[in-house]
Image: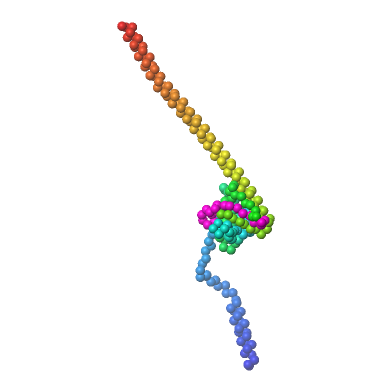
Amino acid sequence: MASNEPEHSREEEETTAAAEDEDTGAQVAPIVKLEEVSVTTGEEDEEAVLDLKAKLYRFDKDGNQWKERGAGTVKLLKHKETGKVRLVMRQSKTLKICANHLVIPTLIVQEHAGNDKSCVWHAADFADGELKDEMFCMRFASVENCKTFMEMVHEIAESQKSKEENKDASAAAGLLEKLSVEDKDGKAKTDEKSKEETKEEAPAASKEKGSESEDKETVSST
């Protein structure tokens, strides 16, 4: 009798465990309902023409030394409508922006002295929410990545320079055309004014001739 009790208890435990593991099909509503939230990065209207891992440094003028700004991904983003390109870098963990400025025609990227994996440049940066004149140094994992970055920035700066020149040429052409139209309008107005003055002088001349004729008739009768 005593030997059967442990076996019977073991069977009951197995039955109870099986019942607990059995899926009853019941649905339990979550205590807190989380709604899907769309997150915007500000890059929706841009496409990446370059995407590389790097580490960014900023030159501290007060301390006269380089300070690390962040490590992450640097991108060159081209706007789909305007064609303008900006450099954006975010820290890998926090995604905080540590560099954000346009690639303008005057931007020059040079190799850092003594390190062929790094390059330096000046830019009016907007990463902190206001324009600041910054000097940056970026270090890449390989020489190839550094050269790729420098060549791409140089190529974009040259293309932006061509756009600026075409824009200036179009603006100059438009200004010349406007001046030409204004000159034509001014000349036309001057001609009209001259004609009106001529018309006004004509009756006055007729009156003078009429008065001369009357004077002659008066002299004759006398």
Residue at 56%, 54% in the rendered image: 134
Tell me, yes or no, if residue 185 can be seen here.
yes
Residue at 51%, 35% in the rendered image: 178
Q: Nearer the viewer, residue 76 or 20?
A: 76
Residue at 61%, 56% in the rendered image: 137
- Span colored in magenta: 114-133
User: Residue 142 occupies which quadrant of the picture?
Assistant: bottom right
- Image position of 143 (left or right of 45): right
Residue 152: percent from the left, percent from the top? 64, 51
Residue at 36%, 11% in the rendered image: 213
Residue 10 lies in magenta, yes or no? no
Residue 1: percent from the left, percent from the top? 63, 93
- Looking at the image, residue 199 lies above or below residue 30: above
Q: Nearer the viewer, residue 2 or 215?
A: 215
Q: Quadrant of the C terminus?
A: top left
Residue 156: percent from the left, percent from the top? 62, 48
